Image (spheres, rainbow, N blue to C red):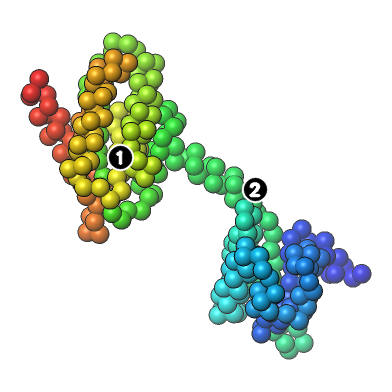
Amino acid sequence: MSLINQVIQNFPGLIAVKKLSGEHIVVNENYKNFFPFDVHGLTLDDIISKIENEDVIALLLQCKANDDVALCDPTKVITSIETFNDTSFESVRYIMKENGDEFMALLSWDITEKVKTENNLTARLQRDDLTGIANKTALMQRTFSHNTVVYLDLDNFKRINDTYGHLTGDEMLIKFASFISNQLRDSDIVYRVGGDEFVVVFESVDENMIAERLTQIRDRIEQDTEFLGMSFSFGMQVMHQDITLPTALGVADKQLYMNKQQRQNKR
């Protein structure tokens, strides 16, 4: 076996060389073993017609689309990621010439553990260290459609820190974050964006219903002695295509402090 053949057969992934019309002419053992039949001379369409497993078909359709991208720009090396069940593959495609003919070379390898590590790191970076809920980074990176943004601030939280100590204050923040998250729908996400400041993003809910629900939650907190007299004020802004998140937060923040002032004046 020549050195180049040893490299191909011992490559820890999949290798295939195809005519530009799609027929496989060279595959390594890993590629060959991925299918229950010989793929030499077959195109991806031919293989798809012989496969019944929908997950494999989905993978091959991804491969076909990425082959088309490589064919559109034969001067470039095209890198892509394809998924199969819980497995992720990184693939490289490029057009090569041999004796005046052109072929597509494909190299693909398993990057599942790398993807999992990156996803775990991203998830950690988007979680608040103290409360475990989503943080400001996660809020700023999300997309919005039919949402209402609510800015929420705990009232006189400094009193708890001064009276009971910062450790108890941290415990109250954790308790509050858990409580309010459990009182909302799964689609309504709570973010901690500051020391005692939170943002709640509601999905497709009328503003009056949001205000009513938050008032109910606030009443329960105020009546629960375990919250040590905690309460909160809030303001909101409906998201739409003509408003950015920072602008929406600014409007909601102004409403929050108006709400806080009104509530203080009633006491």
- Badge 1 density bin: few <14, some 14–19, many ≥20, Cα 10 Å: many
> Can you say whether 107 is above or below 191 in the image?
below
Q: Position of residue 159 (x, y in %)?
A: 25, 16
> Which residue position is annotated with label 2?
113
Quick one: which residue is furthest to the bottom in this view?
Answer: 100
In front of the other: 35 or 194 = 35
Q: Position of residue 106 (x, y in %)?
A: 69, 70
Please tell me whether mark 2 sits on a helix, a strand or a loop. helix
> Which residue position is annotated with label 1?
200
The tag earlier along the polypeptide, 2 or 1, is: 2
What is the three-letter code of the residue carrying label 2? Glu
Q: Position of residue 252 (x, y in %)?
A: 20, 42
Quadrant for the C terminus in the image: top left
Residue 78 visible in the shown view: no
Q: Position of residue 242 (x, y in %)?
A: 22, 59
Q: Give the quadrant of residue 57.
A: bottom right
Residue at point 57% right, 77% down? 68
Q: Does residue 125 appear left or right of residue 116 in this picture?
A: left
Quadrant for the N terminus in the image: bottom right
> Can you say whether 186 is above or below 28 in the image?
above
What is the three-letter code of the residue carrying label 1? Val
Residue 216 visible in the shown view: yes
